[in-house]
Image: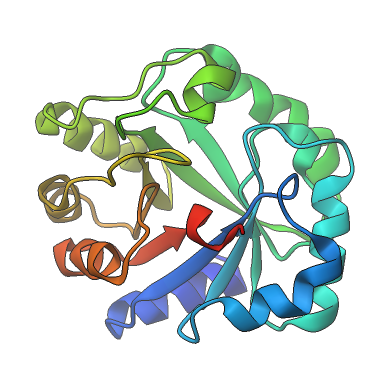
Amino acid sequence: MEGVFYKSFLKSVVEKEKQLAILIDPDKFAISETKLFLKKIPKETTHLFVGGSTVANGKTEESVKVLKAVTKLPIFLFPGDYSQITSEADVLLFLSLLSGRNAEYLIGQQIKSISMLKDSSLEVISTGYILIDGGNNSAVSKVTGTEPLSQENIELIVNTALAGQYMGAKFIYLEAGSGAKFPVNPEIISEVKKAIHIPLIVGGGIKTDAQKQAAYNSGADMVVMGTAFEN
């Protein structure tokens, strides 16, 4: 059953309204400067994503509570592990790392989260998460012990995205990783978008308006920007 936030996202896709999420890493987020931070983010921001590869216990919930008090933007959890889940947010991106072969991040973490989710009010959206080589050794790669997919192997990336869709994912998320030297190639975005029938999210290494527009023009329904707004 599709929830309110997913239906709203689909409506935006149908109406060709591009979405922009700003990713907040609770370990790098200065809670005392929340209002100032929100003033600095682009006016076209539609969502806030909260999460990181490694976050100190309780920091995610603390950040979400403070953000909730001062903004009406929907808050999506983008967790590195199940300990970051908090019912204070609106939505949980229920991530499965399709690009790796570490069972812990394909299904293990997901099972560990269930006791927290059974009675939660969070809207849970199944998300096929694909790590793409961004030219650096990303935190995701280190934590999960998996290798990113080469940007040169477009067929493998497309097939991985399609496998995620066939397995029931409601989003495909192409991620070059935090601090990536370069973002996901527009050709990859275009080929994945042509192949799948579900919304496409693209993030990692997108630091400029030109890079953001290139992702949109290639078919990204949502662009996620993070590092550029952390300081």
x 25%, y 57%: residue = 197
Q: Is residue 221 left or right of residue 142?
A: left
Residue 167 appears anywhere in the view: no
x 44%, y 59%: residue = 224
In the rendered image, which quarter contains the C terminus?
A: bottom right
In this rendering, is residue 178 above or below 135?
below
Give whichever of 143, 172 is nearer the camera. 143
Residue 69 appears anywhere in the view: yes
In the rendered image, which quarter contains the N terminus?
A: bottom right
**What colour-coding does the image apply?**
rainbow
Residue 101 placement: quadrant = top left
The image shows residue 170 at horizontal and vertical percentages of 43, 52
The image shows residue 65 at horizontal and vertical percentages of 86, 65
x 31%, y 35%: residue = 134
Q: Is residue 214 left or right of residue 132?
A: left
Give whichever of 79, 29 is nearer the camera. 29
Q: Is residue 199 left or right of residue 118?
A: left
Give whichever of 169, 155 is nearer the camera. 155
